[in-house]
Each structure stands twice: as structure tokens, then as C-alpha cells.
Image (spheres, rainbow, N blue to C red):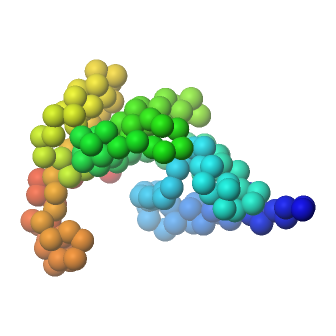
Amino acid sequence: MIQKTGFDNERYFKEQTAEILKRVDRFNNKLYLEFGGKLLYDYYAARVLPGYDPNVKMRLLSKLKDKADVVLCIFAGDIERKKIRADFGITYDTDALKLIDNLRAWGINVLGVVITRFDEQPAAIIFKNKLERRGISVYTHRFTKGYPTDVETIVSKNGNDPPLFPLPL
């Protein structure tokens, strides 16, 4: 059986780059993007989208690297529970360290790491210290009361108390 290519990487790369750059221009050279799924080695997407390059998102970021800084976010609960990335059999915190190294190898700046829903979990503190020893800026973000359903609280001055992190704007 001949498998037909269903995903056009070059088209994705070209169209996504153009759309992102348009948005950057619209927002005074600042744009915050969230990438779903894996940035590198996304073999799940490659399996379900015939022809998908498992590293196409990294290629996209690499093309935009002069205009981009990356902030990685990791859930403190996943660190504490030692959640495993099933495809590689490594913990999420180890995967984050590996991703930082990979991003840097592609010439992409990692501005810092945010540990989300942080509540002084011992394993999250150890991870935070490990990152800081490597010279990586680390920010913590506590649980937001009412998230995700109480929009009024979430967008109020109390919705992000304390502030998420003081990144340069």
C-alpha cells in the first residue's frame, strides 16, 4: 500500500512564518505565541499526519530566532509526580533541560523558565535550583484562584497575584 503524503511541511513553514511576521508587525514587534505539542521530535504528529516533519516547529522558530525569545513553562505538579514523557521515557523536568539545550543548539534564545502552579513543592524547588545553577532565569507562578472558569477574577489585578514574572517588554 502506498502511503500518500497528507501534510505539506514547506507550505506550513511558509504560511506560518508569514502570518507570525504579520502579527509581530501589528503588535509593535512583540508577540507571544504558545506552541501546542512538542517543539522537537513530535513523532505523534508525524504518525497521524503523513509527511509531517517532526521538527518543523523548530525549523519555524529557528527562522524567527532573531525576533524571538523563548519562555518555557512547566507545571510544578508534573515535576513533583515525576511525570514521564511516554515517547522518550524521561521525566518532564529532564525533557525541559534537554529542550533548553536543543533550542540553544539551534541558536534560539531561552529567556527563562516558568514553573506554573508552584506551591513550594520539594521537587520543583530542586529543579528551580538546578536551572539557576545553569544560569537560567526561573520564575514561579502560583495557582490562580478560579482558573479557568472565573474569568472576572483571572483578568483582575488579583488574578495573577503575585505577578507572573518580570520579563522585559
159 up-or-down from 75: above or below: below
- Residue 31 appears in the picture as rendered: yes
Residue 116 as seen in the image, left or right of residue 35? left
Residue at horizontal 18 percent and vertical 47 percent from the top = 118
Tag count: 0
Q: Nearer the viewer, residue 20 or 55?
A: 55
Residue at horizontal 20 percent and vertical 52 percent from the top = 117
Q: Nearer the viewer, residue 32 or 6?
A: 6
Q: Position of residue 38 (x, y in %)?
A: 52, 50
Q: Position of residue 121 (x, y in %)?
A: 15, 40
Residue, far right: 2
Residue 131 as seen in the image, left or right of residue 97? left
47 up-or-down from 66: above or below: below
Q: Nearer the viewer, residue 107 or 80?
A: 80
Q: Which corner quadrant of the image does residue 79 belong to? A: top left
Q: Which corner quadrant of the image does residue 137 belong to? A: top left
- Residue 166 appears in the picture as rendered: no
Q: Position of residue 88 (x, y in %)?
A: 52, 38
Residue at horizontal 22 percent and vertical 28 percent from the top = 126
Q: Position of residue 110 (x, y in %)?
A: 42, 37
Residue 9 as seen in the image, left or right of residue 103? right
Residue, far top: 133
The quadrant of the image that shows the N terminus is bottom right
Residue at horizontal 48 percent and vertical 45 percent from the top = 86
